[in-house]
Amino acid sequence: MTFMPRAASLFALGVVAACGLSPAGTSPDDELDGGPFDGLDAAADSSIFPDGSPSDASLPDGAIVPLDGGADGGDGASTDGPLVVDTGADVGANVDAAVVADTGLDSGFDSGLDAGLDAGLDSGPAADACIPQASEDCTNGRDDNCNGLVDCSDPDCGPQYECVPTVPTGWNAAALNVTSRATCPTGFGTPRDVVVNPSPLPAGCTCTCNAGGAASCEKGSVTFYGPSVFSSDCSTVGTFATNVDDGNCQSSVPWGLFGFGIGANASLRATSVPLVANTCSALVGKSVPPSAETQGKRCLAASALVGGGCPAAQSCARRTTGSFLSCVGKTGVAACPTGWPIGHRTGTGITDTRSCSACTCGSTASCAPATVTFFAGSSCTGTAVSSPADNVCRPMVTTGQSATSWRYDSVVLTEGCQKTVDALPTGTIAVTGEETVCCK
């Protein structure tokens, strides 16, 4: 028997294959499956694709199979043929962080550093979905430096960015300094010198009443409705009005024109003298609290871009520095939105019109019931008979008595003053160019 070297044998097999011949005991395409001459058609020979890929039944007989057409499925240490460059899609591997080309031995995953799912083929250099950048951009919602951390969750963003409540619609991200007009912090601009939180307190108002002069119930005139000569029923013969003066004795008796003292038939109907009140003046006391505004500065965020890496309802935004607070601002007067509870009233200036209204005071004096007293003697001496000055008809004196003088008496009660209209606060502090700024 003659033995051929292995190379010659392989060459011979190639010749046979090229001529469409098959060694004895083999199927027509057995030599094309890259396996031993085992008599099995390539469509049934699982040794061709040990990684579990679809069989080559779809390949026409006589086709040359130089490359592995299956998917990397983790077939261990099986060799895919004499020369394999993997052209299948990775179904279990991560994205290549470096250029990866399989050259024969499949280990289940690419031998390069994987950082994500591979969407491409391993037929050559594979594009990496995460290409490391020099630094993390904290406002784009991406992992720029490929460390698995996005924006505010990345320590690189900590010094300059922080998680804040999401800025609501109609508001602007802002920084506010309530005590200083220092330079705006990095990342903020549109500076505005402002007055901050002027006092909301109204003016304090008091009203003081001062009495002037003296009240009197004995100044004025009293009217007597005259007697009847024949009876004491106050059937009027005439009336007589005369002045009374502070309770002084009056020596001229009414109806004295008859030339004698009025006797038993005399009657009268005396009226009260009107009150002469004391005067009252009102004095308003006003105390206006300090306006108490501080000199501050408001700055707006230089960019509206915000990033991720924060809890729900929060965004990664530029961090304020120094004595500046992280806030949102809105023109005019507004209620603070959710997440930004501390409100500040700001503007470019104030106008203070706080004051007090006028007040008035009135006399408290009143008169005790008045009396008219007739005396038998002159200068209001001797026997006396008193009658109320209540416009009721009464006998002037008792039977047999005559009168030669009289006196009108009344006293002042509760003399003084009291407020009738109090002083009230008026006006307010108006803010020019008002803007509501709410901070977290």
Image: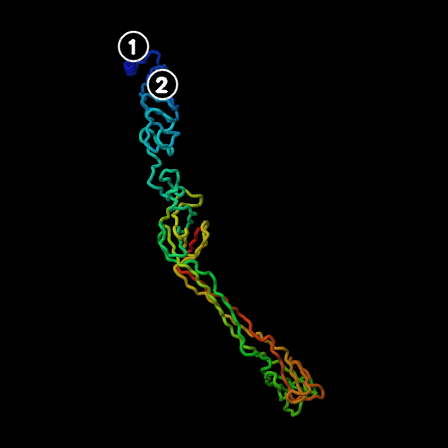
Specify which label sits upstream in the sequence, 2 or 1.
1
Front residue of 8/434: it is 8
* Residue 21 sits above or below residue 133 on the image: above
Measuring from the top left, give residue 54's x and y in whole percent. 38, 23
Q: Give the quarter of the image for residue 177.
A: bottom left
Q: Is residue 180 visible?
A: yes
Q: Please name the residue that numbered disc 1 is placed on.
A: 3
Given the image, on which type of amino acid does mark 2 rest?
A: Ala
Q: In the picture, which quadrant includes the N terminus?
A: top left
Q: Residues within 10 Å of mark 1 (few under 14, many from 20)?
A: few
Instruction: Calculate the distance from the C-alpha at mark 2 to the C-alpha at mark 1.
Output: 28 Å
**Residue at (43% x, 52% y) in the render:** 439
Given the image, on which type of amino acid does mark 1 rest?
A: Phe
Front residue of 343/121: it is 343
Query: Residue most toward the top?
Result: 1
Q: Please name the residue that numbered disc 2 is placed on.
A: 42
Q: Is residue 170 visible?
A: no
Front residue of 231/280: it is 280
* Residue 98 sits above or below residue 218 on the image: above
Measuring from the top left, give residue 83's x and y in whole percent. 31, 22
* Label 1 secondary element: loop
Way the structure is coloured: rainbow
Which mark identifies residue 152? Answer: none
